[in-house]
Amino acid sequence: MSASDPVADMLTKIRNAAQARHEKVDIPVSKLKLEIVKILKTEGYIKNFKKVQEDNKSVIRIFLKYDEANAPVIHGLEKISKPGRRVYSSYKDLPRVYNGYGTVIVSTSSGVTTGKKAAEKQVGGELVCTIW
């Protein structure tokens, strides 16, 4: 568990829970994590999520999604920007993940969004993570 990078910790928890075929995973709440989870939901990588109050702590409960063969829909999650090395990109240079099958999440001046939406709005920003 990395105290210096809570987003990387969240991605690792989701990746491990999906590989272990868990139904749900709980993650401590933050605004950035909540925005990333909302994107995961709208892009179809998770079933659902909700904020839960447990033992005086707020957590995001994420319900993982599996296909017909009980394989996880999330094949990979990878953190791009790290605390020691931030990675920024203009809207023209946003990376494509698996030739458009994956999603890149970008933290822009107008909020956290996917790479496609950032390119449409013509805003660049910090590359947070990729999902495929």
Image (tube, rainbow, N blue to C red):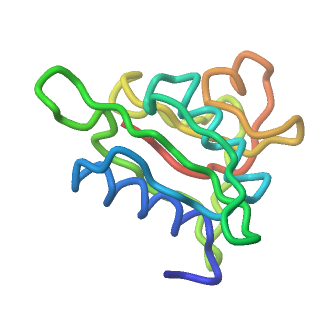
What is the residue that sits farthest to the front in this orientation?
A: 55
Q: Is residue 129 left or right of residue 5?
A: left
Q: Quadrant of residue 119?
A: top right
Q: Is residue 81 above or below residue 67?
A: below
Residue at 11% x, 26% y: name it: 69
What is the residue that sits farthest to the top in this orientation?
A: 120
Q: Quadrant of residue 66?
A: top left
Question: Where does residue 97 sit, x and y in percent of width and height?
Answer: 41, 34
Question: Where does residue 110 sit, x and y in percent of width and height?
Answer: 88, 35
Q: Is residue 16 above or below residue 114?
A: below
Q: Is residue 21 left or right of residue 53?
A: left
What is the residue that sits farthest to the right in this orientation?
A: 109
Q: Is residue 79 above or below residue 82?
A: above
Nearer-the-camera pick, 121 or 43? 43
Q: Is residue 29 above or below residue 94?
A: below
Q: Is residue 58 left or right of residue 94?
A: right
Residue at 64% x, 40% y: name it: 50
Residue at 79% x, 23% y: name it: 122
Residue at 45% x, 39% y: name it: 63
Question: Where does residue 26 sit, x and y in percent of width and height?
Answer: 52, 58
Question: Where does residue 9 sit, x and y in percent of width and height?
Answer: 51, 69
Quadrant position of the C terminus in the picture: top left
**Number of numbered discs on residues:** 0
